Image (cartoon, helix red, strand yellow):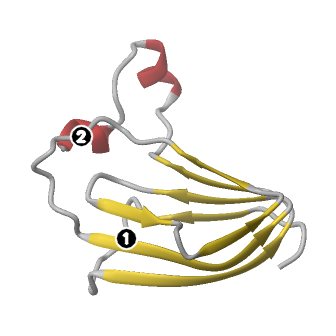
Amino acid sequence: MTYCEVTLDFTDAVVTHDTLRIDVGMTGKTLTLVTRPGIVVDTDGLKLIHSKVKHRRIPANPDTPTTLRVELVGQKAHGRVVVRPPRRSFRQWLLRRPTPLSARA
């Protein structure tokens, strides 16, 4: 893909395997992965060319088991890879409440 935004949301994903391998071939813009507790993203196999990875982790219970390991392999050029938790609603933000997923962990 060239110069497009891609968002993969794993918050409500039905997990049937322990590992998901995603072959990335992307130039420009941002690849965003929205995760929940128990989902681990591995970017070690991703070749970055003038790109960077931003990984925001949510504070979770250390006893939370890993239910899915997402492996990113391939090449990402001229853009960003963002791994983040789901966004809070305006009301949650206003009341400074965590997202429902981080509250369950």
Residue at 27% across / 81% down in the picture?
18
Q: Would you place residue 97 above or below residue 73 in this image?
A: above
**Mark 2 neighbour density, 10 Å: few (under 14) some (14–19) many (20 or more):** some
- In which quadrant of the rendered image does the C terminus lie? top left
Q: Is residue 84 left or right of residue 18?
A: right
Q: Is residue 81 left or right of residue 105?
A: right
Residue matched to label 2: 60
Q: Is residue 54 left or right of residue 84?
A: right
- Residue 89: x %, y % from top left: 49, 31
Residue at 84% across / 66% down in the picture?
4
Q: Residue furthest top?
A: 95
Residue at 23% across / 36% down in the picture?
103
- The amino acid at mark 1 is Ala
Residue at 9% across / 49% down in the picture?
63
Report which quarter residue 1 is drawn in.
bottom right
Q: Would you place residue 100 above or below residue 3 in this image?
A: above
Q: Is residue 31 left or right of residue 50?
A: left
**Mark 1 neighbour density, 10 Å: few (under 14) some (14–19) many (20 or more):** few
- The amino acid at mark 2 is Ala
Element carrying mark 2: loop
Residue matched to label 1: 13
Element carrying mark 1: loop
